[in-house]
Image (spheres, rainbow, N blue to C red):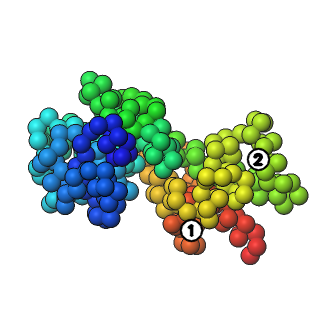
Amino acid sequence: MAKNLIKNGYPVIATDVFPESCKELQDMDAQVVDSPADVAEKADRIITMLPSSPNVIEVYTGPNGILKKVKKGTLLVDSSTIDPAVAKEMAVAAEKMGAVFMDAPVSGGVGAASMAKLTFMVGGLEEEFKAAQELFTCMGANVVYCGQVGTGQAAKLCNNMLLAIGMVGTAETMNLGIRLGLDPKLLAKILNMSSGRCWSSDTYNPVPGVMDGVPSANNYQGGFGTTLMAKDLGLTQNTATNTKTPIPLGSLAHQIYRVMCSRGYANKDFSSVFQFLREEEAQ
């Protein structure tokens, strides 16, 4: 995302808790600083992308956080996937400092991020959304205004619940077909021209050897980690409980991904649920 901003002529000031993450940006003439507060001192448009709600709270409100040195009128965009309630809290804290906060989680994964084809789901004031749109279009192909702060997160959590359910379903289906003697490439081809087709079957197939350029072709390295999927499903579970919404398949997907985390799949891509199911049957 940062590289695409640089490619579009924006000077970037970056920081990361793992400084080596900024090495490639430094090579592209980005300025690297020590803390989020240092970024806030120098920039009036700040984008954060972090693993979880506690990280976002720390980066915005911690001792070296953005809000310690944020300038009045600064636009703050958080593209993490977090609890919608935390996004609303950050918006209130930012407003007290005279800054504007928007939640803008993304979909599309590492591939879409590198090709500037992400989908942004944006929550915040509509007039601020219009001002921020030029930044989003440098990094994404689809930018959707969802409503007030927190609605971007709501849209993302709904998407990821369906993604998890679809991936588990695709993995189960492919595994069953293989056990019934079908060639996995042939089965994927049939699914993708039939009513069972979904993103997990036609763009991100979980079976090694069916597609090139996806994590299943690379021992499930890279992509979207199982830990992150379990985290997102946990957030979805919380929001479903709070709104008294039944999500039987979402809850089941959450349990499957939590078990995977404890069985050595935590750092593998979430499509490794196929490998997990194969191991389960072998026991």
Identify the residue under disc 1: 265
For residue 270, side relative to residue 173 (left or right): left
Q: Amino acid at mark 2?
A: Ala
Q: Is residue 113 visible?
A: yes
Identify the residue under disc 2: 188
Lower position in the chain sequence, tag 2 or tag 1? 2
The secondary structure type at the circle numbered 2 is helix
Q: Is residue 59 visible?
A: no
* Res. 191 mark: none
Residue at (39%, 38%) from the top-left corner? 139
Is residue 153 positioned above or below 20 on the image?
above
**Figure label count:** 2
Residue at (15%, 54%) from the top-left corner? 38
Location of residue 130 by image quarter = top left
Tag 2–tag 1 contact (CB < 8 Å)? no
For residue 282, side relative to residue 180 (left or right): left
Front residue of 216/170: it is 216
x, y percent for residue 6: 31, 42
Is residue 116 positioned above or below 132 on the image?
below
